Image: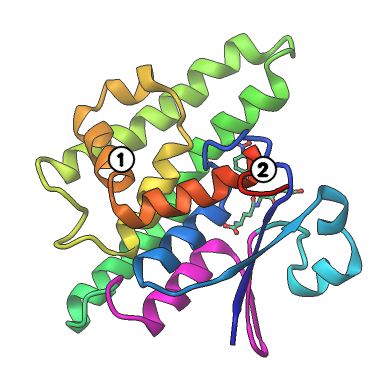
Amino acid sequence: MTITITAFEHSPDRGIGLARDMRIRWALEEVGQSYAVRLVSFEAMKAPAHLALRPFGQIPTYEDGDLALFESGAIVLHIAQHHAGLLPAEPGARARAITWMFAALNTVEPPIVERSMAIVTESDRPWFAARQPILDARVRDRLSQLSARLGTSDWLDGPFSAADLLMVTVLRRVNNPTLLGEYPNIAAYIARGEARPAYQRAFADQLAVFTCIPAC
Ligand code: GTB
């Protein structure tokens, strides 16, 4: 059975891997699971066939035979639960890793996405100059707290896990070397994630969609 995921036909990030299909690609690469990608346009995402898979008209989705999933966190958790290598076997360590997965998506990602969306959609609005420092401060709060917890560790809690995979993809969305540069251990943590061979393969595959290599 072929696993099929969906990704943007034309990613607005121009191939820098910020869209959430990157999480699914990376997770599948980490566990050595092959997959196919169905590229969707913005129009197709809002059409009935895609809405049947994903009620909110977004990417990514995940299909494996009769099983259709949406929400990148749920998809990564599903992959991690069905393959070795992304979650510890010991129950306590596994529960802690899943806790960090939720923390990445529910506590760290929201202020980062809010800041990033405001830059895209509000930067020409009269209120933006006053709003930006507020949004930056909310991101800094989370980065400082995460930085304090991470300390000199390579990963969030023991060996690399699905929690690190999600956290690194969340942090990449800050997409601001100056802001991230204030937290050298977080910048190094992101770089460690990006250096993993599975990440590199996932990144190259999503970039190929943007650059139309090997084919359009
Ligand atoms: N909570 C959902 C999940 O985790 O799966 C959120 C899914 C989501 O936001 N999907 C986005 C989408 O389909 C793509 S990833 N948007 C289209 C729509 O809502 O109509 C978000 C994203 C988009 C673009 C950039 N970028 O250009 O940098 C980064 C991230």
User: In the image, which residues are magenta?
Assistant: 60-86
Asked whether disc 1 touches disc 2, contact meaning CB atoms under 8 Å apart, the reply is no
Where is residue 65 shown, x and y percent of the image?
65, 88
The answer to whether 20 is drawn above or below residue 126 in the figure is below
Q: Give the residue displayed 68% in from the left and 57% down from the top.
A: 59
Q: Nearer the viewer, residue 203 or 216?
A: 216
Element under disc 2: loop
Where is residue 32 shown, x and y percent of the image?
38, 72
Whether residue 9 sits left or right of residue 69 in the image: it is right
Q: Give the residue displayed 73% in from the left and 12% down from the top.
A: 124
Identify the image quadrant of residue 138: top left
Q: Which numbered dot is residue 190?
A: 1
Identify the image quadrant of residue 194: top left
Whether residue 15 sits left or right of residue 133 in the image: it is right
The answer to whether 139 is drawn above or below residue 93 in the figure is above
Label 2 Cα neighbours within 10 Å, binned few <14 / some 14-19 / many ≥20: few
The answer to whether 143 is drawn above or below residue 107 in the figure is above
Disc 2 CB within 8 Å of nearest ligand 1 atom = no
Kindly identify the amino acid type of the residue bearing the numbered disc 2: Cys
Whether residue 6 sits left or right of residue 86 in the image: it is right
Which residue has dot 2 on it? 212
Q: Give the residue displayed 27% in from the left and 21% down from the top.
A: 182
Label 1 Cα neighbours within 10 Å, binned few <14 / some 14-19 / many ≥20: many
Identify the image quadrant of residue 165: bottom left
75 in the magenta segment: yes
Figure colour scheme: rainbow
Q: Which numbered dot is residue 137?
A: none
Kindly identify the amino acid type of the residue bearing the numbered disc 1: Ile
